[in-house]
Amino acid sequence: MFEKGKYIVYGTTGVCEIEDITSPDIQGAGSSRLYYVLSPCFQKGNRIFTPVDNEKVVIRAVMTQEEADALINAIPGIGELADMDDKEREKRYREAIRSGDPREWIRIIKSSYLRQQKRMAQGKKVTALDERYFHAAEEQLYSELSISLGIAREEVRPYIQERVRSLEKTEDQ
């Protein structure tokens, strides 16, 4: 069980702060069942009530700063998804987003970015599928890294790019 005031990743909603842990008066919920009252960090005005023992949605702690740094350092070694048809790609993208696993989000970002580059080089348009999941994966990843690293979400992409560039320079030496 997580503590009040902590940050968690709640399914595809993303990073939420635990406002409270309570037994709300919800019809059919049973008065002894505990619920998290969650406030999504990047969706102002929303509030989520979810059972503490919810097994249907991935709920995990936000990564620590050390884990975030290690993940960013690992980005060059995280491979993209294998090439597949659109139907299979959408299935894999959807599973990766729902997994709650930042490494899988990176795989989506890499895969869809490389597909976009390849298609543009061929004079083709970017597919809506790749674009939609690219942005969804970025949203999930950058929101969590923002909280973990204590920087604004808009600063996460440049931060990652700079770190990866410096890692590549170090490897080249």
Image (spheres, helix red, strand yellow):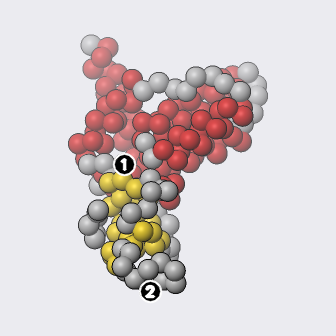
Instruction: Look at the image and tell me in which quarter the C terminus lies.
Output: top left
Residue 71: give x, y in percent of width and height: 33, 36
Amino acid type of the residue that numbered disc 1 sits on in the rendered structure = Leu
In the shown orientation, is residue 156 left or right of residue 124? left
Is 60 placed above or below 172 here?
Answer: below
Q: Residue at x 53, y 36 (%)?
A: 109
Residue extending furthest toward the left: 66
Residue extending furthest toward the top: 173
Other residues around mark 1 within 10 Å, as few (<14) / some (14–19) / many (≥20): many
Residue 4: give x, y in percent of width and height: 28, 70
Residue 171: give x, y in percent of width and height: 30, 17
101 or 147, nearer to the observer: 101
Is 34 placed above or below 122 here?
Answer: below
Q: Residue at x 53, y 45 (%)?
A: 97
User: Which mark is first along the chain, 2 or 1?
Assistant: 2
Give the numbered dot on residue 25.
2
Amino acid type of the residue that numbered disc 2 sits on in the rendered structure = Asp
Other residues around mark 2 within 10 Å, as few (<14) / some (14–19) / many (≥20): few
In the shown orientation, is residue 57 left or right of residue 124? left
* Residue 152 in sight: no
Q: Which residue is drawn at 73% across and 21% down?
A: 122
Q: Which of marks 1 and 2 is in front?
A: 2
Find the distance from the CA under tag 1 to the CA under tag 2: 35 Å
Q: Check disc 1 and report the residue beneath it.
A: 145
In the shown orientation, is residue 170 left or right of residue 56? left
Q: Quadrant of residue 116?
A: top right
Instruction: Look at the image and tell me in which quarter the N terminus lies.
Output: bottom left
